[in-house]
Structure formats: structure tokens, C-alpha cells
Amino acid sequence: MPFDGSMVNDRLSTALAGRLALQMSLSSLTVVEEWMDTPLTRWLDSVPLPPEMPDGEGPPLVVSIGSDAMLLRWSSGGAPGGVVPKLVDYLRRAGALPADFHQVDAIGQALEPEVVGSWIEARPGAVATGWFVADRMDTARLRVLLGEGSWMDDLGGGTCLYAGRSIGADPVTDIVVELEGAERADKLAAAGAAFARCGLVFDGAAAARFGGQGVALGVRARADQVLSARLLVARPGPGAAGEACAALGLDLAPAVGVVERSIGAGEMVQLEIERSAAGVAVVVEFVAGATRAPAN
């Protein structure tokens, strides 16, 4: 599809403005130390600009923030033809091992996912990064391709929607699957059963408070040991972050709203309620874009 010059310039200007906004938003987050600027900037430079994508549209920049502002995650993905060339170079520069490249290639060849991308996250004193694929994928087949163990059987057998992994030694694998059931109550019951199989408490009362456009189950594991399980609520509506924190006895850090406004975010696209050995956490997710009313 041909693009006129003004369209290309407009999209490029929008993409560059979005990147600048993301970088400027870092000043609001104490979790981001000065030394982290370099890996975060390297990741941002790896995201293709609109002219580098087949459809001329830049991949969305997704920002996830913990309710205590002690977690920041940036992620972006799009059509493999536009994303993979820069992704390979980025992973190499970020310290990926040969096994990391092999897995990305094997999954790409076997499943041909619609979306391929990367992520980077900052936590107190640490930065991690990795890759992901997103599409409707067979969970059993994906388990074989990833070389994962029996913990993936505890997910309940739903279709896999997302699979990601950190790079380097001792990686963390992140899987998101559909929840089985015709009604929302059935899906929440399935989530509760999956949490129990993982040995974690499910906050059913808090989860039932939200509407949204759908729910899914996410699990993170390392070396066949489950680290956390989470309920993902799509587009939960205005005020959902504050409501979730209040229901779970958590504080919502003012920095979350500051970042949301500074990146020109639209509505909250996802809310996560995550359980791990450390306790419960709430994570909110935005896509940089047209500003609307704050979610908190």
C-alpha cells in the first residue's frame, strides 16, 4: 500500500513524540536509577518506526506500572516482517544466548505468530528484558517448543494467547491463556482452580468487582517452579486501579497517575491482580496515545 509523504511524516512525528514522552516519564519513578537509562534507551531504539513496518504503522508502546510504582515494564510488538530484524540485533546487544535465538526461531517457524515483540522491565536495583509472541496458539505444542515442564498442565488447557521469556541464564517464562467457561463467573472459577493448583491464593472477591471486556490467566515460572499467577482484566474501566488497590489493601502511588498523563495514555487497557510468595500486587497497563481521564 503506497503512503504519501505527509502521512509518513505525521506517523513518524507521532512515534518520535511518544518515545520522548516515555523517556521524560522516567523522572517520575524512583525505581528507575540513573544507570538504567542506557538499557531502557537501547530497548526503545529497537522498536521499529512507522516507515520500517509493512503497514506504515508504528508498533504500540505499552507501559505497565505496579500500583506501588516499584515496577515499570515497556513492551512493544507487531508484524514479524517489520519487528524481527531489529529484535534480533537488540537481543544480541542485550546479551541473549544462542538458546534464546533458537527458541524464538523455532516458535516463529512452527507457529507463525501474528505478533512478535520484546519487553524490558525495571524493578528495584535490577533490569530484565526478553521477547514475546502473541496469537492464538496451542498450549501443549508451545510447551514442547519452550521445553517447559508440568507446570503448564496446571493452566487448565485453554488456548495460549501470549508467551514470553527473559533472555540469559535461568530465564523466566511467562504464559497467558484463555480461561474456559461460557460466563464470567465460570472463567473466574477456572482462574481460582488454576491458582490453587499453583499453590497460590485467588482474590475472587476483588476480581468479581470489575467488568471489562474479558479475563485471562497469566503464570510466570522459572526452572519449572511457578513464581506467580495473575488474573488479567481487559479494559476494566475508569477508576479500576484505585478500586482494585482499595479492595486488596494496597496503596496506589501518585506516580502512576503522573506517568499515565505524561505519556498521553488513553484508557487503561489492562489491569492485573498478581499473587506470588511475596504477596499480592496490582499492575496497570496503558498504551501511549490520546489522553483521556486518568484511570485513578
Image: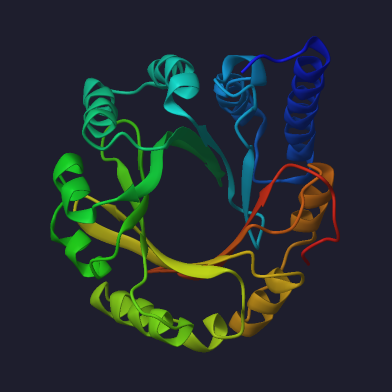
Q: Residue 139 in the image: x percent, y percent?
A: 23, 54
Q: Which of 83 and 241 is in front in this view?
A: 83
Q: Is residue 162 above or below residue 275?
A: above
The residue sitting at 77% across, 54% down in the picture is 255
Q: For the C terminus, give its image quadrant.
A: bottom right
Residue 275 found in image quarter? bottom left
Decide if residue 285 is on the left or right side of residue 11. left
Residue 52 found in image quarter? top right
The residue sitting at 65% across, 75% down in the picture is 245
Question: Can see residue 203?
Answer: no
Q: In this view, does 50 lie above or below 132?
A: above
Q: Residue 267 in the image: x percent, y percent?
A: 74, 58
Q: Residue 243 in the image: x percent, y percent?
A: 70, 78
Question: Can see residue 270?
Answer: yes
The residue sitting at 44% across, 83% down in the picture is 183
Q: In this view, does 238 lie above or below 127?
A: below
Q: Is residue 115 above or below residue 12?
A: below
Q: Nearer the viewer, residue 270 or 37?
A: 270
Residue 59 found in image quarter? top right
Decide if residue 59 is on the left or right side of residue 219. right
Q: For the N terminus, give its image quadrant.
A: top right
Decide if residue 89 is on the left or right side of residue 97. right
Q: Residue 276 in the image: x percent, y percent?
A: 40, 67
